[in-house]
């Protein structure tokens, strides 16, 4: 089932996700719906908060070296905790909840996280580059943050101005 993706400035995007406590079929079904939604909207990452469910879960599915978005590479990340963050990377980010807007964001280049999969198994993952960026972007969603909060002051001003202009023509 394709879910509705909330878009800026929906207040629900600013809620803080609750820890997942039940790793049951309902969670599995919800993660399947998130995947279907992300693919339908041409995304590479999606957090539960973006589809109106305030829980600490997100998915990431980058394209591989053959430019293919392979479901075998899908990461389902629940209740993540950062163990390490180092270095710096600037990447031009976008977000399904902020359509048609892309801007540079500075984040850690290398990360290590601990998280749970859909079955409640504890995992660790080291990531760098785009995967590290995607995980930090999605983790922001579960803390109620959007990437537009991490762009510079002047860029944010410009975003707000353009957003208001666009809202008027709707
Ligand atoms: C988060 O973003 C991300 O504006 C995932 O018209 C961002 O999937 C991970 C999208 C940067 C790593 C680097 C945005 C699709 C998708 C749009 C997305 C749009 C269509 C964004
Ligand atoms: Co996003």
Image (cartoon, rainbow, N blue to C red):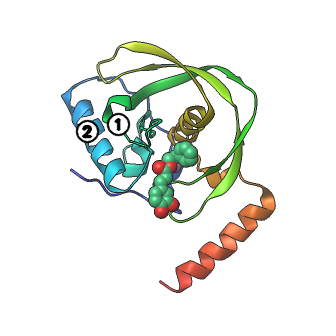
Please tell me which residue is depicted at 39% across the width and 54% down the height of the picture: 42
How many numbered circles are shown? 2
Q: Residue 61 in the image: x percent, y percent?
A: 41, 38
Q: Of callouts 1 and 2, which one flags the residue occurring earlier in the amino acid sequence?
A: 2
Q: Residue 39 in the image: x percent, y percent?
A: 33, 49
The furthest residue to the bottom: 169
Depth check, mark 1 against mark 2: the one in front is 1
Please tell me which residue is depicted at 80% across the width and 63% down the height of the picture: 154
Q: Residues within 10 Å of mark 1 (few under 14, many from 20)?
A: few
Using residue 30 as the reference point, say whether residue 133 is left or right of it.
Answer: right
**Residue occupied by mark 2:** 32
**Residue occupied by mark 1:** 70
**Is any part of residue 7 visible from this angle?**
no
Please tell me which residue is depicted at 32% across the width and 29% down the height of the picture: 72
SS type, badge 2: helix
Q: Quadrant of residue 152?
A: bottom right
- Determine which of the numbered discs, if any, sits on residue 159 in the image: none
Residue at mark 1 to residue at mark 2: CA–CA distance: 15 Å
Q: Is mark 1 within 8 Å of ligand 1?
A: no
The furthest residue to the right: 154
Q: Would you place residue 3 above or below residue 18 in this image?
A: below
**Is any part of residue 135 visible from this angle?**
yes
């Amino acid at each position: 089932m394709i879910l509705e993706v909330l878009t800026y400035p929906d207040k629900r995007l600013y809620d803080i996700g609750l820890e997942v406590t039940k790793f049951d079929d309902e969670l599995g079904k919800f993660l399947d719906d998130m995947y279907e939604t992300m693919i339908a909207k041409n995304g590479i990452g999606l957090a539960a908060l973006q589809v109106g469910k305030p829980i600490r879960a997100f998915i990431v599915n980058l394209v591989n070296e053959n430019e293919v978005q392979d479901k075998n590479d899908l990461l389902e990340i629940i209740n993540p905790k950062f163990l390490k963050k180092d270095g710096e990377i600037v990447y031009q980010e976008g977000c399904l909840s902020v359509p048609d807007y892309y801007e540079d964001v500075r984040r850690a280049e290398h990360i290590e996280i601990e998280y749970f999969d859909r079955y409640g198994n504890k995992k660790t993952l080291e990531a760098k580059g785009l995967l590290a960026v995607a995980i930090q972007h999605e983790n922001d969603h579960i803390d109620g943050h959007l990437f537009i909060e991490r762009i510079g002051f002047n860029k944010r001003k410009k975003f707000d101005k353009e957003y208001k202009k666009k809202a008027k023509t709707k």
